[in-house]
Image (cartoon, grey):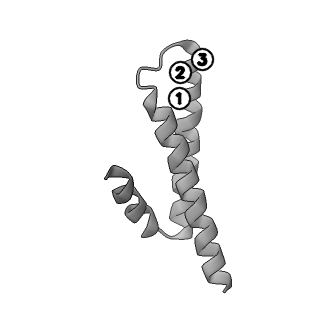
Amino acid sequence: MKSKQRASDLNAMSQDQLSDELLNLKKEQFNLRFQRATGQLENTGRVREVRRDIARVKTLQRQKAAAAKA
């Protein structure tokens, strides 16, 4: 259910907002990888969630670009 809610929130965003969200997710992914490398990561499942959110944002960006082109 959380991912459906997340997808609908992302769907309502503009291209600029999606780019900002992607940047924030990439930063979070970097921090999580750094925490994992130093042994400080507590919530290991968050790495997977962030990776999937990044894919979700990229997919929406491609869809919106294709729709604008057509």
Whether pointer 3 and pointer 1 mark residues with C-beta atoms closer than 8 Å, the reply is no
What's the CA distance linking mark 3 and mark 1? 9 Å
Residue at the extreme right of the image, as rendered: 69
Lateral position of residue 14 relative to residue 66, left or right:
left
Give the amino acid at mark 3.
Answer: Ala
Question: Which quarter of the picture shows residue 34?
Answer: top right
Question: Dot 3 surroundings within 10 Å: few (below 14), some, or many (20 or more)?
Answer: few
Residue 7 lies, in percent from the top left, at 42, 60
Residue 32 circle label: 1
Residue 46 lies, in percent from the top left, at 45, 34
Whether pointer 3 and pointer 2 mark residues with C-beta atoms closer than 8 Å, the reply is yes
Residue 32 lies, in percent from the top left, at 53, 29
Q: Helix, strand or loop at disc 2?
A: helix
| Residue pictured at 58% horizontal, 52% vertical | 55
Identify the residue position indicated by label 3 in the image: 37
| Residue pictured at 51% horizontal, 63% vertical | 17
